[in-house]
Amino acid sequence: MKTGIRSRAGVRALSLATVAGVLSGAAVFAPLSVTPALAASPAPAVDADLDGDNLTDLLTAGGEHGLASGLWLASGQSDGRIAAVPTDIGAHGNGVFHPGLPEGPADFDGAQVVTGHFAGGALQDILVYYPPTHSRNPGGAVILHGTGDGSVIRAELDQSFSNINAGTFSGMDWDDFQTINSPSQLVNAGAHHSTVYPDLIGIAGKDDGSSFLTYYANHGGIGGYNDLAVLPVRTPTGGTDWNTWTIATAQTGTGTALFLRQAATGKLFLWNDFVRTDAGTAEYASYLLSDNFHTGEDVTLHAADVNSDGIGDLWTVGDGAEAVAWLVSDLDSTTSTGTLTAQPSQHLNTD
């Protein structure tokens, strides 16, 4: 299938702040000539570590599952446990709905939140995506620049966010002249086309009811996702009904761990080390993790290497603001299966 982009990314230019210091004072002796030492570049934060402790954290949007409106960060503790009381790092809004104003936790209602190095630096940032069904910004997105210490993001400041225009993630199928709609979901695919900025994986469809896995390469730039490709990949059960699946990803030492869940059947798969090939398809190792994972239930998936063992894991957030870590182990390439172990449920107290 040939695809072409109907509209290009509209990324808000960042305001660059310049800080100058002037030292003055009487000098008795002539000053020494000193060559300043070059500061070492900080190591990139590990995937989903938003508070700087080198452990993955749980980040979830409020307004559902009993969570108050906001962008809730619960610090991870390496064994599946999280901080009892999360922090609303989105208390100042997303920077777009209330320009210049430090307010708007409801800006994240109905949004999907994805962590990654989306601003191109060492810190973990947040891609806030609004699916086509969103009432205020359908198909649009915002990149919130991470603080590195888990503090509230001051989105009223231009340098704290970058806007991505609605329509950036849509395109055209030139074979049948149908629009490829903005995706229903977006997740982090890891940095492949750029050395810094992550690509994205999505699930999208056309008005004829067809749905498919999509890929958005970033060739270098904040919000530079104007390269849409449809991946000729079938679902884990061999179908084309991608609209019945939900996805989540974690970045591990070996690559991208892509989790795929079909709510109606309870099927849960891990496509480990997922990567788009030069031929335009995808390579991965597939593992069945469960035949009855929250069958028919409304839960949100968040993927991360929760226990820092090099294998992607899951958090689920469901009714009553209950969060559960699911640790993945014993991946067997012979049987294409893995073990999924639930940790004790924890309540996300956002009252």
Image (cartoon, grey):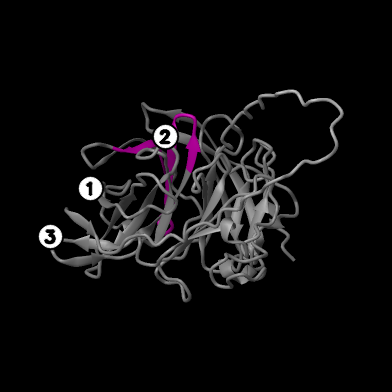
Residue 124 circle label:
none
Percent position of residue 97, x then y: 55, 72
Screen quadrant of the C terminus:
bottom right
Tell me the chief SS of the magenta region: strand
Of marks 2 and 3, which one's residue comes earlier in the chain?
Answer: 3
Badge 2 marks a residue whose secondary structure is: strand
Near mark 3 (Cα within 10 A), the count class, few <14, some 14-19 or many ≥20, is: few
Q: Residue at x 41, y 65 (%)?
A: 165
Depth-wise, is mark 2 or mark 1 nearer the camera? 1
Q: Are marks 2 and 3 in contact (CB under 8 Å)?
A: no
Task: Provide the residue span drawn in magenta.
Answer: 250-276
Q: Is residue 43 visible?
A: yes
In the rendered structure, the answer to whether residue 197 lies left or right of residue 239 reads right
x and y percentages locating residue 27 in the rendered image: 84, 32
Q: Residues within 10 Å of mark 1 (few under 14, many from 20)?
A: some
Question: Distance of mark 3 from mark 1, alpha carbons?
Answer: 15 Å
Structural distance between the alpha carbons of marks 2 and 1: 24 Å
In the rendered image, which residue does mark 1 sit on?
A: 232
Of 30 and 138, which appears nearest the observer? 30
* Mark 2 or 3: the one toward you: 3
Determine which residue is flagged by label 2: 337
Q: Residue 254 lies in what quarter of the image?
A: top left
Residue on which disc 3 sits = 175
**How many numbered tags mark residues here?**
3
Amino acid type at circle 1 is Pro
The residue lying at 84 percent from left, 25 percent from top is 29
Q: Is residue 164 above or below residue 275?
A: below
Please report whichever mark, 2 or 1, sits nearer to the chain's N-terminal start: 1
Q: Is residue 18 magenta?
A: no
